[in-house]
């Protein structure tokens, strides 16, 4: 499995870079890896996909571990058209995955505004688009269903390209005339929650802004479809008892963002949510509502069936009830942070206490953060619990990973990072500080084992900029076809550049030299040393427009 994923990720990174190169030819579209392994019934290999909740105010209640409403079976009553007893969730692990490939459109141009107040440093004005769209790679999924899914996107590739072309043309005219510049951006991130023969579920979060004033703010558009016929799944399909759902949210989610709006939406039958394997997730709350414990509230026919490898989100009280060891009976695992530098994990009737003695990395004070999701992963290397906390000093996210094996919870490792994409537990997207130039963040796709995260590629995504060069920078043209540096070249002084990819193994930094006309942009490979010097030049002497971390 890992060899397949690694091979596909290698291809996808090449395609992603080729996409940036092709964006130089006008379309600005690149491919990210594919989630879910190999597509069914296809003859060509494709790639695995590359590419926020609040403190509960609740009364402690005894979690249900009754298995009467949760049956383990080889098949669900109907995987593609749920029609069985809605108060029963049939558990199986044989769903076929529909591989998903993300397409990213990343277009950017900028310049220093001669009228800018530089009291707090020089920053770039710019026009920018970052957009993730999806392509479902299963040849057996009819085109009309794919088209129906694609039509649900809030912001589409063609629209993004057209809007960018108009804005950048206006921007370039202002730059040439020496007039005051503006900044305008669209950032649309797409997160997949399910993609299988029963349900396709994802959401697209779009942030748009213009010269400091939000135009549309943040728009979240969850989308759920039955895979069999492309029929969209709404609240009326999944929620059996609105009043009981409201009661659960009032008990477990009070104080969450948009709490009142969510209650009103449920009452009016227009709740936005995504589908999980064991319940629903409400993005505006950043909280999950599990089926177990809410039998009769949610329609169990939509839940319980999973692929062989899958990920679950912990419940609002940082626990989960599920058949973890595969014996057909529900287990319960929960996590608590009773004080800084300590964590307890309770697995059924056994409680494990972890401090700096068991996990030396706990030497920094951390605290339970109400805005993080936590995960239970069933991967090809075992079952893992991932719990996120915040460092008290700087509010960075740290994850603690435990392996669940032989009925025990064993600490595996911790890392200063976040889980950005979790749907496929064998290809997790990890976000962390790149350790390059003092500010750049990077994301990489990794497999998980008890030693840590194993990246599938040398390069991680950075997507930072734009910046302007303060001097000539020698480098090498980057050939996306051969996926290697080519002929030597020089980026002229006062060029505008974006940072695309970085390898902390080789120190290679792939930048895009920008131009208002996309066909004139190009990719260049620069060498970074000590995380600070670009081709031997301190980054603060090489680029202007940076905002340093901290």
Image (cartoon, rainbow, N blue to C red):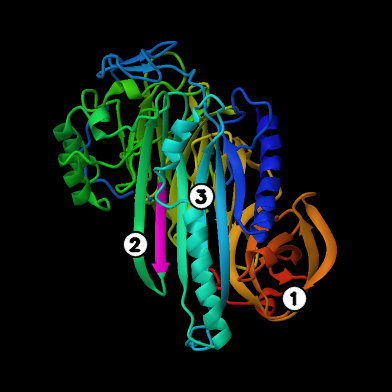
Kindly check if marks 3 and 1 are in contact, taking CB atoms under 8 A apart as contact: no
Q: Which residue is mark 2?
A: 216
Compute the Cα span from label 3 to label 1: 34 Å
Badge 3 marks a residue whose secondary structure is strand
- Residue found 63% across the figure and 64% down from its top: 518
Kindly check if marks 2 and 3 are in contact, taking CB atoms under 8 A apart as contact: no
Whichever of callouts 2 and 3 sits on the residue coming sooner in the sequence is: 3
Q: Is residue 444 above or below residue 422?
A: below
Badge 2 marks a residue whose secondary structure is strand
Q: Report the label total.
A: 3
User: In the image as oriented, which residue stretches furthest toward the top?
Assistant: 74
Prevalent SS, magenta region: strand
Report the front residue among 97 and 231.
231
Q: Is residue 177 above or below residue 426?
A: below
In magenta segment, residue 395: no
Q: Which residue is mark 1?
A: 537
Q: Is residue 228 above or below residue 172?
A: above
């Amino acid at each position: 499995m890992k060899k397949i994923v690694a091979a596909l990720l290698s291809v996808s990174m090449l395609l992603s870079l080729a996409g940036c190169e092709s964006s130089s030819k006008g379309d600005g579209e690149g491919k990210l890896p594919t989630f879910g392994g190999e597509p069914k019934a296809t003859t060509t290999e494709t790639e695995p996909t590359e590419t926020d909740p609040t403190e509960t105010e609740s009364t402690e209640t005894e979690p249900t571990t009754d298995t009467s409403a949760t049956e383990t079976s080889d098949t669900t009553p109907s995987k593609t058209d749920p029609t069985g007893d809605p108060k029963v969730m049939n558990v199986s692990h044989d769903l076929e995955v529909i591989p998903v490939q993300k397409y990213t459109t990343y277009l950017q141009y900028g310049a220093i505004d001669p009228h800018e107040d530089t009291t707090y440093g020089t920053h770039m004005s710019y026009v920018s688009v970052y957009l993730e769209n999806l392509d479902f790679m299963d040849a057996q999924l009819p085109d009309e269903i794919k088209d129906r899914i694609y039509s649900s996107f809030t912001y589409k590739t063609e629209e993004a390209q057209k809007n960018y072309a108009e804005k950048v043309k206006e921007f370039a005219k202002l730059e040439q005339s020496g007039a005051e510049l503006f900044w305008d951006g669209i950032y649309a991130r797409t997160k997949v929650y399910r993609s299988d023969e029963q349900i396709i579920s994802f959401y697209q979060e779009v942030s748009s802004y213009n010269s400091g004033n939000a135009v549309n703010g943040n728009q979240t558009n969850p989308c759920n479809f039955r895979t069999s016929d492309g029929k969209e799944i709404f609240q009326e399909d999944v929620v059996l008892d609105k009043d009981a759902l409201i009661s659960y949210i009032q008990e477990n989610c009070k104080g969450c963002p948009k709490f009142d709006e969510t209650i009103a939406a449920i009452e009016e039958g227009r709740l936005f949510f995504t589908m999980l394997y064991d319940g629903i997730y409400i993005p505006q709350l950043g909280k999950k509502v599990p089926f177990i414990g809410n039998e009769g509230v949610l329609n169990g026919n939509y839940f319980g069936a999973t692929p062989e490898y899958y990920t679950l989100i912990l419940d609002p009280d940082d626990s989960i009830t599920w058949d973890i060891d595969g014996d057909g009976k529900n287990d319960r695992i929960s996590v608590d942070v009773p004080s800084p530098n300590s964590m307890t994990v309770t697995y059924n009737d056994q409680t494990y206490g972890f401090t700096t003695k068991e996990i030396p990395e706990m030497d920094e004070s951390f605290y339970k953060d109400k805005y993080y999701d936590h995960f239970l992963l069933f991967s090809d290397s075992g079952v893992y619990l991932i719990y996120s906390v915040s460092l008290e000093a700087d509010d960075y996210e740290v994850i603690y990973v435990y392996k669940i094996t032989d009925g025990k919870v064993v600490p595996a490792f911790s890392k200063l990072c976040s889980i950005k994409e979790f749907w496929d537990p064998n290809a997790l997207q990890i976000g962390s500080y790149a350790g390059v130039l003092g500010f750049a963040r990077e994301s990489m796709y990794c497999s998980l084992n008890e030693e840590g995260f194993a990246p599938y590629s040398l390069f991680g995504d950075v997507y930072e900029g734009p910046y302007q060069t303060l001097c000539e920078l020698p480098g090498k043209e980057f050939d996306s076809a051969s996926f290697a540096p080519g002929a030597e070249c020089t980026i002229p002084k006062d060029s505008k550049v974006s940072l695309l990819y970085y390898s902390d193994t080789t120190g290679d930094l792939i930048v895009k030299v920008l131009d208002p006309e996309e066909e004139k942009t190009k990719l260049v490979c620069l060498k970074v040393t000590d995380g600070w010097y670009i081709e031997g030049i301190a980054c603060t002497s090489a680029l202007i427009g940076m905002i340093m971390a901290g």
